Image (cartoon, grey):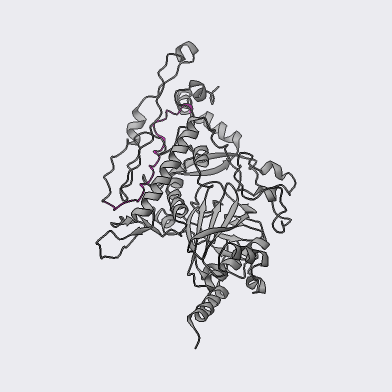
């Protein structure tokens, strides 16, 4: 009689063989070959044994754009996940921030689940697995996109691309975990490692509310070393939710509906809150000590790990010198073959322009980049705006600018009904407010009252009460891009 393990292996093998890569990051399909059945290399098997792991134990994958690194974590014999290996990413496309729509070249950010059916042994990019974008959160915000992969070939149009040798190892690790009984492995995709240093450097990024939300899942994983349970409600992520004490009704989550009453294990909630307090304190200290904000990547398409960039002509120019927390050194040999078509990240020849979009007042803001010729953009502005209009826009006084959304609340306790949101100022009211004109005479400028910076709203402990929109046009949890009381910084765009 065939035991359950053999049956599970047969079912998983059938699912892996049936996996197909659609369009998007692939191309023409290839006939099946033995590449999908290559064993885990002997050296990696030795590392697995050294770290007290089993060949077929569950895995978990973490992706970091800024550092261009992919981590494979594996469950050890004590039941905890431990880091097995860090792989440098050969290429990813887009910018820091989540994917919003089809064709924006953004590699996804968030939490995704990979089943055997998403593994593709016939990928035109050697081997691949589909990340499962869009997930329920993405769909709740109307985000679009398809066929977003982790694959080989070092070429990306919204994917995370490895070398063929790397994806062969990663694919084999996933395959063996399925053979061992894992139904799906989790992929956590982040803009950068969620450290206080990085949160301080990117404090002005409009995606910060979204990043703070997914950082909570990162914190759950780091304090428990267990794969966090992920749910969605009220268009936000919820981590490690369980039924309240005494409740007999099963939890039912809907990404677009109100959160049910739930709680997080007090032990986990306390550990996560303690970590968050420490991280926030360190972040505030770094900012107070003058930590510089990250340099703009405006218009640069994606990234590449220095271990690859340093091996390509002019590749040194593509390396972000401000990033110091690489796990893989750039001077090491390239882990795999760099194909001839691999290109370093470069800015487009046309000047990028930015807009911040949100489908409703609750959604975290997303920076959307479009490239338009700088000359024509300037010419259009000159012909359509008066002097006072341009001046007020330069110093940030245009009342008709869109209102940013506030950061979602952290689910750490039993949820309550959402609080009513106070309506923000209308566009008509904003237009009726006359712009404040700053005098050109510097002696008068010195006596001009300074405009105070908008304070960051405090986060709440209620799980299901999303924060109301800020009363001033500033991002929740972010610091102003320039000092609000500095005339020189405001006037520099005109001067």
The answer to which of 379 and 155 lies nearer the viewer is 155
Q: Residue furthest top?
A: 443
Q: Is residue 27 visible?
A: no
Q: As displayed, is residue 162 above or below residue 296? A: below
Q: Nearer the viewer, residue 460 or 425?
A: 460
Residue 196 included in the magenta stretch of the image: no
Identify which residue is drawn at 39% across, 31% down.
454
Spot occupied by residue 365 in the image (x, y as percentages of width and height) = 44, 44
Number of labels in the image equals: 0
The magenta-colored residue range is: 394-416
Q: Quadrant of the C terminus?
A: top right
What is the chief secondary structure element of the magenta stretch?
A: loop
The residue under the point 51% across, 30% down is 289
- Inspect the magenta stretch and tell me whether residue 415 lies in it: yes
Image location (x, y in percent) of residue 360:
37, 47
- Residue 206 is situated, as x and y percent measured from the top left of the image, at 47, 41
Q: Does any portion of residue 422 appear in the rendered image? A: yes
Quarter of the rendering containing residue 149 = bottom right
- Give x and y (percent) for residue 393: 46, 28
Q: Is residue 433 above or below residue 14?
A: above
Nearest the viewer among 435 and 466 is 466
Q: Residue at x 67, y 67 (%)?
A: 42
- Residue 300 location, quadrant: top right
Closest to the observer, 217 or 371: 217
- Seen at 45% across and 12% down, the residue is 444
Q: Is residue 368 left or right of residue 153?
A: left
Query: Is 333 displayed left or right of 109 in the figure?
Result: right
């Amino acid at each position: 009689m065939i035991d359950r393990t053999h049956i599970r292996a047969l079912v998983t093998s059938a699912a892996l063989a049936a996996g197909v890569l659609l369009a998007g990051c692939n191309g023409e399909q290839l006939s099946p070959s033995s590449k999908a059945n290559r064993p885990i290399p002997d050296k990696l098997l030795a590392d697995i044994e050294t770290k007290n792991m089993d060949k077929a134990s569950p895995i978990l994958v973490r992706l970091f754009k800024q550092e261009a690194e992919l981590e494979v974590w594996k469950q050890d014999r004590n039941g905890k996940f431990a880091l097995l290996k860090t792989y440098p990413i050969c290429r990813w496309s887009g910018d820091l921030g989540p994917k919003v729509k089809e064709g924006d070249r953004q590699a996804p950010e968030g939490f995704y689940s990979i089943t055997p059916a998403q593994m593709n042994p016939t990928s035109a990019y050697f081997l691949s697995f589909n990340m499962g974008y869009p997930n329920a959160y993405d769909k709740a915000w109307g985000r679009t996109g398809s066929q977003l992969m982790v694959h080989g070939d070092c070429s990306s149009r919204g994917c995370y691309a490895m070398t063929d040798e790397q994806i062969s190892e990663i694919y084999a690790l996933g395959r063996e975990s399925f053979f061992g009984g894992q139904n799906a492995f989790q992929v956590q995709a982040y803009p950068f490692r969620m450290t206080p240093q990085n949160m301080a450097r990117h404090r002005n990024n409009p995606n910060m509310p979204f990043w703070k939300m997914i950082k909570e899942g990162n914190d759950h994983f780091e304090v428990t070393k267990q794969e966090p349970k992920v749910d969605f409600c009220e268009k936000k992520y919820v981590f490690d939710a369980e039924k309240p004490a005494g409740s007999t009704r099963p939890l039912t989550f809907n990404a677009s509906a109100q959160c049910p009453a739930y709680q997080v294990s007090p032990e986990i909630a306390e550990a996560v809150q303690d970590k968050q307090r420490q991280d926030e304190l360190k972040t505030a200290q770094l900012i107070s000590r003058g930590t510089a904000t990250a340099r703009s990547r405006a218009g640069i398409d994606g990234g590449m790990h220095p271990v690859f960039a340093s091996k390509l002509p002019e590749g040194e120019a593509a390396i972000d010198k401000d990033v110091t927390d690489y796990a893989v050194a750039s001077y090491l040999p390239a882990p795999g073959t760099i194909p001839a078509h691999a290109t370093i990240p470069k800015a487009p020849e046309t000047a990028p322009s930015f807009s911040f979009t949100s489908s409703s007042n609750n959604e975290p803001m997303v920076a959307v980049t479009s490239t338009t010729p700088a000359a024509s953009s300037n010419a259009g502005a000159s012909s359509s705006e008066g002097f006072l209009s341009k001046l007020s826009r330069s110093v940030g006084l245009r009342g008709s600018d869109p209102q940013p959304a506030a950061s979602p609340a952290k689910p750490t306790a039993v949820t309550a009904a959402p609080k009513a949101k106070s309506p923000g100022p209308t566009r008509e009211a904003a237009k009726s407010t006359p712009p404040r004109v700053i005098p050109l005479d510097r002696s008068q400028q010195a006596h001009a009252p300074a405009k105070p910076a908008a304070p960051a709203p405090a986060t709440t402990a209620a799980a299901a009460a999303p924060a109301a929109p800020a009363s001033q046009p500033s991002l929740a949890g972010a610091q102003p891009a320039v000092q609000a009381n500095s005339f020189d910084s405001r006037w520099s765009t005109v001067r």
